[in-house]
Amino acid sequence: MSLLLLGAGAATLAPGAAQAEEIGSVRTHFKITGSDRVVVEAYDDPLVPGVTCYVSRARTGGIKGSLGVAEDPTEASIACRQTGPVSFAGPLPQQTDVFSERLSFIFKTLHVVRIVDRPRNTLVYLTYSDRVVTGSAKNGVSAVPIPANQKIPVK
């Protein structure tokens, strides 16, 4: 049982990856054992201080949800904004996972990917989910333009 709880809902993070902070939620379906919710999570891009992304997504309640074994729906939305002075911790990969979190015990993962659009000097953030067998085409995208006098360093 402890192994089950340890792996359930755990974020899988690369070194320097962002960690989500739940900032709010609303109930969508009442259950005595725990309601289904839509949560809003914020995370600061660890390699781009001054950029925060907000992801909203469904979380399954009930007994399975409270134990971390429920499969959350694949719908997610993202909005990224400049929340302070933008700087870069170093050169950025052209494309990389910034954050990922399991939506089910084994099979489904939510991803947030940062893509550098060099010609437009813009950071593009994409959210999507994948499964072991088949993923979902449901996705969301947001972009943060960087001032023209501040070029994005790319590896």
Image (cartoon, rainbow, N blue to C red):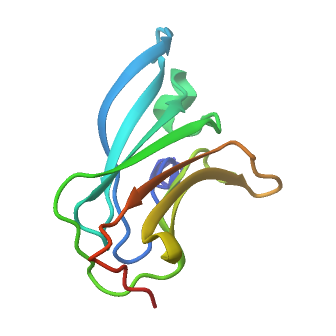
Vertically, is 122 above or below 38?
below
Query: Residue at point 47% right, 47% down?
Result: 5
Vertically, is 26 above or below 121?
above
Query: Residue at point 22% right, 61% down?
Result: 50
Q: How many marks?
A: 0
Left or right: 34 in relation to 69? left
Query: Residue at point 45% right, 57% down?
Result: 11
- Comparing 24 with 33, the one in front is 24
- Comparing 137 with 99, the one in front is 137
Quarter of the image where one finds residue 123: bottom left
Query: Residue at point 38% right, 34% down?
Result: 40
For this orientation, the residue located farthest to the left is 85
User: Visible in this render: residue 101?
Assistant: yes
x, y percentage for residue 80?
A: 38, 50
x, y percentage for residue 56?
A: 46, 35
Left or right: 121 in relation to 95? left
- Comparing 20 with 70, the one in front is 20
x, y percentage for residue 99?
A: 45, 61
For this orientation, the residue located farthest to the front is 148
User: Visible in this render: residue 13?
Assistant: no
